[in-house]
Image (cartoon, grey):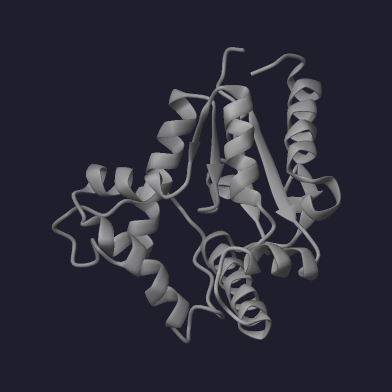
Amino acid sequence: MEKHVVITIARQYGSGGKTIAAMLAKKLGINCYSSQILRMASEDSGINEKLFGMSDEKLRKAPWFKTLSRPYDGELLAPEDKDFIKDDNLFNYQAKIIKELAEKESCVIIGRCADYILKDHENLIRVFIHADPKFCLDRSMERHSMSEREMARYIEKTDKFRGDFYRYHTGHEWYDARNYDLCLDSGKLGFERCVDEICSYTKIRFGEEI
């Protein structure tokens, strides 16, 4: 295949999307990128990696974040610019890394609005992993020491932030199936079957394995 295939994974909290992404990458023999993108953006920009993580938390608490939309346009500010370490520029550096990865290799990318950032990439497969609330709650309870009520609230808040983050940076709705090529219910299919379905779609779409 001449061009690299990139598979982006958006996922509800507790649906196992991150695990499915790792399993998929392993099966295909390609890299899977998630939080590594923050480190790479830090190295590229010279901005402290902690500021990239803090940016998400700052946006989460900002009262204006839920109502505004500022779709990604690719502009990068110079180090001498007064807004160099502002949230939008931090996101744009992450987007720069995502685009560079897509040009360099076939890979799986988790979150970070990668499906929108790479919308013009010819060999892009956009996947959304979801599951019913009970599945997400039960799975999350296995990994965290919270009460069911606390965990359910945490899941709701996390998914709400992911939706707000997506809307702010893309101008689109995170839950809208039209943003994706595949929407898979991990609770009904199981993780391995989700991986198989993505691989099958890839082969049908491109006529060959990655």
Residue shown at the point (55%, 74%) measured from the top left: 145
| Apparent side of residue 161 relative to residue 134 in the rendered image (left or right) | left
Picture residue at 79% right of the left edge, 29% below the top: 201
Tell me where residue 112 appears, x and y as whole percent.
50, 53
Name the quadrant containing residue 127: top right
Q: Position of residue 207 (x, y in %)?
A: 77, 15
The spot of residue 141 in percent (x, y) is 64, 69
Tell me the quarter of the image containing the C terminus: top right
Front residue of 111 and 29: 29
Residue 89 as seen in the image, left or right of residue 187: left
Res 75 seen here: no
Task: Farthest residue to the left: give it.
Answer: 80
Q: Is residue 154 above or below residue 8?
A: below
Q: Residue at x 39, y 45 (%)?
A: 37
Residue in the picture at 38% in, 45% down: 36
Q: Is residue 116 above or below residue 90?
A: above
Q: Is residue 151 left or right of residue 80?
A: right
Of residues 99 and 42, the one nearer the viewer is 42
Q: In the image, is 105 to the left or to the right of 89?
A: right
Q: Is residue 53 visible?
A: yes
The answer to which image quadrant residue 81 occupies is bottom left
Front residue of 138/123: it is 138
Where, quadrant-wise, is the N terminus in this rendering? top right
